[in-house]
Image (spheres, grey):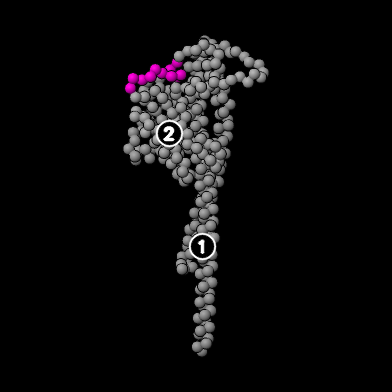
Amino acid sequence: MQSRREIISRIKSVKKTRQITSAMHLIAAAQYKKAQVKLSTALPYFRKIQDTIRDILAHSEKFSHPYLGKQEPSGEKRVGYIVMSGDKGLCGSYNHNVIKLAEECIARSQNSYLMVIGNVGRNYFAKKGYNIDVEFLYTAQNPTVYTARDIADIVLKLYNRDFLDEIYVVYTRLISALSQKPTVMKILPLDVESFEKKDSGEGFHYQFLYHPSPVDVFNEMVPEYIKGLIYGAMVESYASEQGARMTAMDSATKNADEMIRKLTLMYNRARQSQITQEIQEIVVAANSL
């Protein structure tokens, strides 16, 4: 059995660890709420752009556009992947799951172009010998519209200049604070089927006129739509990371409490054993006299 001094030292160490995990849980909870507010604030603007693109596709004459799909390339498709991981660990399997999904996607493409958001993903892919074409550092912990716009500009340039034929975002979709799911989302070319929406038949229906033409408006709307997709994925990934960290730190705090309980029980037994031994020594000494 361990001595009382060793057990007291272990209890102090576990209590210090518990203070850290408890504080990290509270910080993650605050950041999770902040990310939710960011996401809900951006949704109305993003949905309006989405509705505009849907209206153009539904009520305009059919037109061909690079954003709706290019001609099939003669060789292997050049596919770009934007992988969104965290900048930090201690968030359970959050980083592992999204990186694993990204590796599966990359393995299916012989000609892939890798763009990484987050230090954890960057360090992993660099260690594994992947060729990281674009790095977006220190953006996972602070998703902003301006950062999303810069990333969208780079993505659109690569697509418009025919460096890439398809572009996907690999991120973690937020289901709830306790549940997150790694997801692959195609951002270019646009999936026309996702914009198809049947009218409900209720209320008034208006036909909008676009100036100078629906195609010109479409040209202006798509970059904003791509920016919204990337920003939404960044914020959702950040919220998922905080939710995973909340769960991990809550579990660690509960484990620390259980360990403290067991160590305290061991300490009480050791203390009782020492007291019993001292009483026996006194009795033996008294009998010898």
Where residue 195 appears, as percent x and y from the top left, is 53, 21
Residue 171, above or below 272: above
Q: Secondary structure at mark 2?
A: strand
Quadrant location of residue 58?
top right
Where residue 127 appears, as percent x and y from the top left, is 34, 40
Residue 276, above or below 47: below
Residue that extends furthest to the right in the rendered view of this protein = 203
Kindly identify the residue that appears in the image at 53 percent across and 57 percent down.
Answer: 258
286 vs 74, left or right, is right
Quadrant location of residue 32?
top right
Kindly identify the residue that appears in the image at 63 percent across and 15 percent down.
Answer: 205
Region rendered in magenta: 65-75
Q: Which residue is mark 1?
A: 263
Magenta region includes residue 119: no
Magenta region includes residue 71: yes
Q: Secondary structure at mark 1?
A: helix
Quadrant location of residue 166?
top left
In front here: 5 or 206?
206
Quote the CA–CA distance across marks 1 and 2: 43 Å
- At label 1, the amino acid type is Leu
Q: Residues within 10 Å of mark 2 (few under 14, many from 20)?
A: many
Q: Earlier in the sequence, mark 1 or mark 2?
A: 2
191 vs 165, left or right, is right
Q: Which residue is mark 2?
A: 83
Q: In the rendered image, is residue 180 in sight?
A: yes
